[in-house]
Image (cartoon, grey):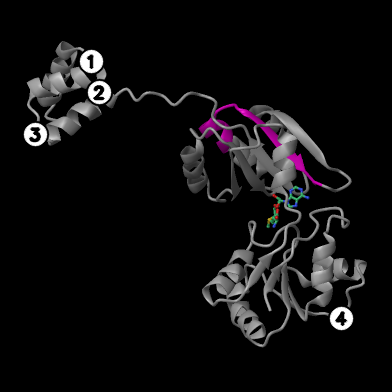
Amino acid sequence: MPLYICPTPIGNLEDITLRVLRILKESDVIFAEDTRRARILLSKYDIESKRLYSYNKDNWRKRIPLLESLLLEGKIVSLISDAGTPGISDMGVEAIRLCVDKDFKVEVLPGPTAFVPALLLSTFTPHPFLFYGFLPSQRGRRRKVLSSLKSLPFTLVFYEAPHRISESLCDILEVLGDRRGCLVREISKVHEEALRGKISELLERSKDLKGEMVLVIEGCLKEPEVKEDSLEDKILLLMKEGFSSKEIAQELHDKFGLSKKEVYKKVLELKGRGEF
Ligand code: SAM
């Protein structure tokens, strides 16, 4: 029997597919990120008296052998997370890896996840996009990640917690600049809202925001800069290959139409700086 990865609602409890409900009904065992929340969902759909095991970031390592033995016994096993699709920003992916590594069948059922509605509500180009999930909580590491995303021409999607949103927006403003962004809160719930504006504006409005949120940031719109030192790079490369100054000037003139005089001057400058 396969392991079934079952997406569950991220807000409105009606956001669940008929197939997920059938699979949950047929399951012998359900692994759930939070068994209490799982019981509320299951009882709404009259799926009672199921064997439930918790499976979350604190205990997944201990749970994997149990999951494996149940699959070996031929039990029908499902995995659900707190909300949305297991594996998206939680430890569900480890259960999927187990199945692939040990040759158990695994079926990932399509269904709700928070980043898709947020991406579309942002109105930024939906593809290409980059789903990052949660930024690191430590400031230095967060800024490093942001620097690596700075020049990507992709819409960027982050998950965030309300107590960290202002800190993250501060860093995003400093590292990525004052781009446009969209903060989508409480998707598929009564107080759903999408705040759109410059990052500086979102930062101002983020102070007392509550609830679950997804932050979408417009990708880099600038053309990639031609690196100023690219002539230097080209020259250094040829020097390393053993070309003489004269040959370098000729080569770069032939290949890129650069002035032989300018190239020659630069070669002498680099040699003077002891670069080679
Ligand atoms: N597995 C989930 C999914 O498929 O989207 C994500 C789980 S992750 C642990 C929880 C994060 O998802 C929240 O901090 C928030 O960023 C986002 N999220 C979940 N439900 C949401 C909702 N209704 N509205 C906005 N964001 C939500």
- Which of the 4 quarters of the picture holds residue 254? top left
- On the question of residue 206 being in view, the answer is no
Of labels 3 and 1, earlier in sequence is 3
Judged from this view, the residue extending furthest toward the bottom is 73
* Residue 157 vs residue 72, the one in the foreground: 72
Which residue is under mark 1?
A: 258
Q: Is residue 51 magenta?
A: no
- The amino acid pointed to by label 1 is Leu
**Quadrant of the snapshot with the N terminus:** bottom right
Which residue is under mark 2?
A: 231
Q: CA distance from mark 2 to mark 1?
A: 9 Å
Q: CA distance from mark 2 to mark 4?
A: 71 Å
Callout 2: CB less than 8 Å from ligand 1:
no
Q: Which residues are magenta?
A: 171-187
Element on which disc 3 rests: loop
The 10 Å Cα crowd at callout 2, few under 14, some 14 to 19, many 20 or more, is some
**Vertical relation: 269 (above or below) 108:** above
Of labels 2 and 3, earlier in sequence is 2
Which residue is under mark 4?
A: 49
- On the question of residue 110 being in view, the answer is yes
Residues marked 2 and 1 touching at CB (< 8 Å): yes
- The amino acid pointed to by label 3 is Gly
**Quadrant of the snapshot with the C terminus:** top left
* Residue 259 vs residue 136, the one in the foreground: 259
Q: Which mark is residue 242?
A: 3
- The amino acid pointed to by label 2 is Leu
Of labels 4 and 1, earlier in sequence is 4
Residues marked 4 and 1 touching at CB (< 8 Å): no
